[in-house]
Amino acid sequence: MRRALVVRGGWEGHVPVEATELFVPELAAAGFEVTVADDLEVYADGPLLAGTDLIVQCWTGGVLTAEQESGLVSAVRAGTGFAGWHGGLVATFDGSHDYLRMVGGLFLHHPEDFLTYDVVIDPAHAGHPIVAGLDDFTVETEQYWMLTDAHNEVLATTRFVSPETPMPVVWTRRWGRGKVFFSAVGHRMEDLRHPTVYELTRRGLIWAGR
């Protein structure tokens, strides 16, 4: 049985407990033995991380110590998968540069009000197992403006209206031997329960596992 570690906490506005509990049964159904941690010190536990096949993180804000950052990044380089959504991955640990390089993005801004916007599956990656068979979809929620890099494999995008700018929504990347999955959608439980968002998130978490 593979092992998954769910790390959750930080700003309560992103409902880290409720959001991660939505996917714990899916991880179990996919054959993961799931452990939950509500303390970042778990990232300094080298033997635990070495035996972990997937880390699902939902932690907005906060600070990683140098030991915690090194432990997490080293585990992913060695093959532990890392996955999550929205601010739980890209609006956190903004002083931890190795962490941000691993994740591949940093949240900068979202419009003050929720927006209705389209998310378009990239035709070049339509066969990827995370999005295969899924159609473009529309959500009403926060639209994230992020800094990203060219190492990301972008599976889905959106477009800001003002100024008109394309922006990635779903990406994967490799970091050493580990796989990384991120989706920008997931501010509220309603967002994660959107049928397409739920399905691609479920698939993304499982895909990232070693």
Image: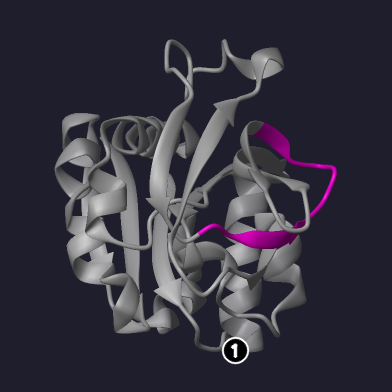
The stretch in magenta equals 143-154
Residue 57 placement, left or right of 80: left
Examine the rendering and report whether any part of residue 84 can be seen. Answer: yes
Question: Could you tell me residue 44's position as x and y percent?
Answer: 50, 78
Residue topped by disc 1:
65
In front of the other: 185 or 206: 185
For this orientation, the residue located farthest to the right is 150
Crowdedness near tag 1: few (<14), some (14–19) or many (≥20) residues, C-alpha within 10 Å: some
Q: Residue at x 31, y 79 (%)?
A: 13
Question: Could you tell me residue 18's position as x and y percent?
Answer: 18, 64
Q: Residue at x 42, y 73 (%)?
A: 59
For this orientation, the residue located farthest to the front is 162
Q: Tell me, yes or no, whether the highlighted magenta stretch contains residue 207.
A: no
Amino acid type at circle 1 is Thr
Image height of 167 relative to 18, above or below: above
In front of the other: 159 or 53: 159
